[in-house]
Amino acid sequence: MLSLCLMVAACGSTVKNIPPSNPAPHGVSSAALPGEEYRIQPGDLLDIKFFYSPELNEQIPVRPDGRISLQLAQEVRAEGRTPAELTAILKETYSSELKKPDVTVIVRSFGNQRVYVDGEVGKPGLIPLTGPTTVLQAIAQSGGFVYTGNTTDVLVIRRSPEGQPLAMMVNLKKARDGSDLSQDIYLRPSDIVYVPRSAIANANLWIEQYLNRMIPRIGFIYSHPAGSGTIGIDTTSTFVTPIR
């Protein structure tokens, strides 16, 4: 997951960047409204019930590729569709096989209702979606921002129904101070939230890795606090301190 985030950050030409204020492509809107109809995800368990042909009833999980296979309908795509949309497709598919293709689709259980939070947060990892959840709420469940986190350039990575990664940059500093609450967008299942390091944190990391650790230590003479006139050698510091 971290590799994907770094790849997205470094290879902007391969990922479409969608500003939160602009409309996104169909099926991957940047703000999933709390009242919108549920769309089927991989891992969901579906009940397929035929009113006049109960022998065709099935309980089937949605495969990782987003499809289901039924007795008389092979390779039907379920991912990204609402139960009503999938019902209409199955009715049309079975119309050539049954006189009364009355069918209904029921989502029995939800298998992929989680998001991933990584980067400069207290507890990176999976966050279950038990209801409408915004980026700030997911980060709060992950322990909140650590002091090295960059709150102005938080990355939300989402996949389109075609599998294309789409990236949105949100400024959570504006959401936290109330100046622009639209930046705190609602998340969708399997979204990735990545909090990068701040510029100051990156500078401090560079100093630690390339100066303090790679440059040989410089010894210097200092006055020992134990007694007047006593001196010693300190080889633990990079910087030279004058003798007191």
Image: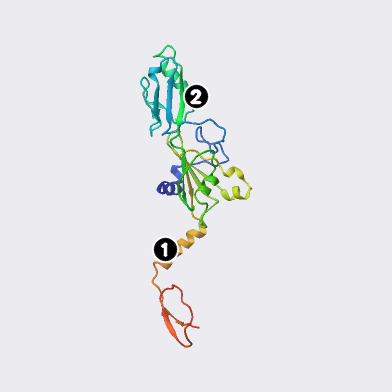
Type of the residue with mark 2: Ala
Mark closer to the observer (1, 2): 2
Q: Secondary structure at mark 1?
A: helix
Residue 176 shown left or right of residue 199 in the figure: right
Type of the residue with mark 1: Gln
Residue 33 shown left or right of residue 94 in the figure: right
Labelled disc at residue 190: none
Task: Say which of 150 and 84 sits in front.
Answer: 84
Q: Position of residue 25 (x, y in %)?
A: 51, 34
Labelled disc at residue 209: 1
Q: Position of residue 181 (x, y in %)?
A: 61, 44
Position above or below: 67 against 180: above
Real-space CA distance between mark 1 and mark 2, rounded to the nearest whole angstrom:
56 Å
Number of residues whose C-alpha sits closer than 10 Å to that of mark 1, classed few (under 14), some (14–19) or many (20 or more):
few
Q: Position of residue 145 (x, y in %)?
A: 52, 53
Q: Residue furthest top?
A: 99
Task: Say which of 168 and 115 sits in front.
Answer: 115
Q: Which comes before the other along the chain, label 1 or label 2?
A: 2
Position above or below: 237 against 149: below
Q: Residue furthest bottom?
A: 229
> Which quadrant of the view contains residue 13?
top left
Q: Which residue is mark 2?
A: 84
Q: Residue at x 51, y 45 (%)?
A: 138
Q: Secondary structure at mark 2?
A: helix
